[in-house]
Image (cartoon, rainbow, N blue to C red):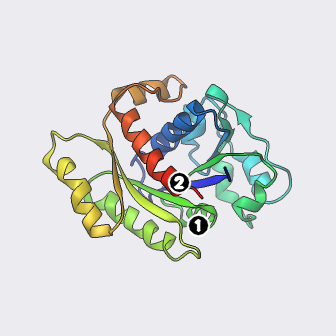
Amino acid sequence: MSTRWIAVVGRKGGTGKTTLALGLAAHYLRLGLRVLLVDLDPQGSASLAMEQTPSGAELVDCLEGRQAAQPATAEEGLLLLSGGPELEGLLEPLPLREALKGEPLDIVLVDCPPGHAALDRLALDAADIVLAACEPHRLAIAGAARVLDEARTREPAPRCALVLGRVDERRGLDKAAPELLAGAFGLPVHAIHQDSGIAAALNSGKLPTKAGRAAEDLERVADWIDKGRA
């Protein structure tokens, strides 16, 4: 299998990007694949969740061509390039695929930051798959729409989908949102249901487990990703 490059984006914060990235990482690790997570967020949320130091200095050195990628090995063998505040000073980054060349990988997941278009573009330029994470309310959907519009300008265009996080179908809007948004965007829409087990795992420095409704949702997202495999 050739390396699959997946960008998890969404211009607003708190929409479940990191949870989605780590949930997919856990899924692919259980399949025995070699997975790299690139934490492209100056807040370093994925790095913190995996109990790594979120400085971003080594990732900046890699992206600016001063050293080869040196990922840490986190929970369950996940390879992780930690993000952090040093990413705010990134000047002239290499294309992501060029910066990470030589790594024998099956899956590269890029966890993008909120509100940082330049770092988003670095991920979009590399991506085969773009997953726009949002919650079913207006501001989050507007942020996802902006980044999806930008993804569609790439040549070749990546496959795109919208992923709604923390869905609770007891709320009427949450229940109706996937169908409504699929029609509005003309894209697949996946729902990740609210699941306290995922939050508990990440709070303890663990990847999400295979149990729980959200894990089933994440498997469906991965199935959609894998259907486009060359």
Mark 1 nearby-residue class (10 Å; few <14, some 14–19, many ≥20):
some
Q: Is residue 44 above or below residue 110?
A: above
Question: Going by the image, does 90 lie left or right of 146?
Answer: right
Q: Residue at x 54, y 32 (%)?
A: 49
Camera-side residue of 40 and 110: 110
Q: Position of residue 16 (x, y in %)?
A: 41, 45
Q: How many marks?
A: 2
Q: Is residue 80 above or below residue 75?
A: below
Amino acid type of disc 1? Arg
Camera-side residue of 97 and 31: 31
Which mark is first along the chain, 2 or 1?
Answer: 2
Q: Position of residue 57 (x, y in %)?
A: 74, 47
Q: Residue at x 32, y 61 (%)?
A: 141
Pointer 1: what residue?
A: 121
Tell me the mark number nearer the camera, choosing from 1 and 2.
1
Q: Is residue 59 above or below residue 193?
A: below
Could one spot residue 84 in this view of the protein? Answer: no
Q: Is residue 98 above or below residue 76?
A: below
Pointer 2: what residue?
A: 113
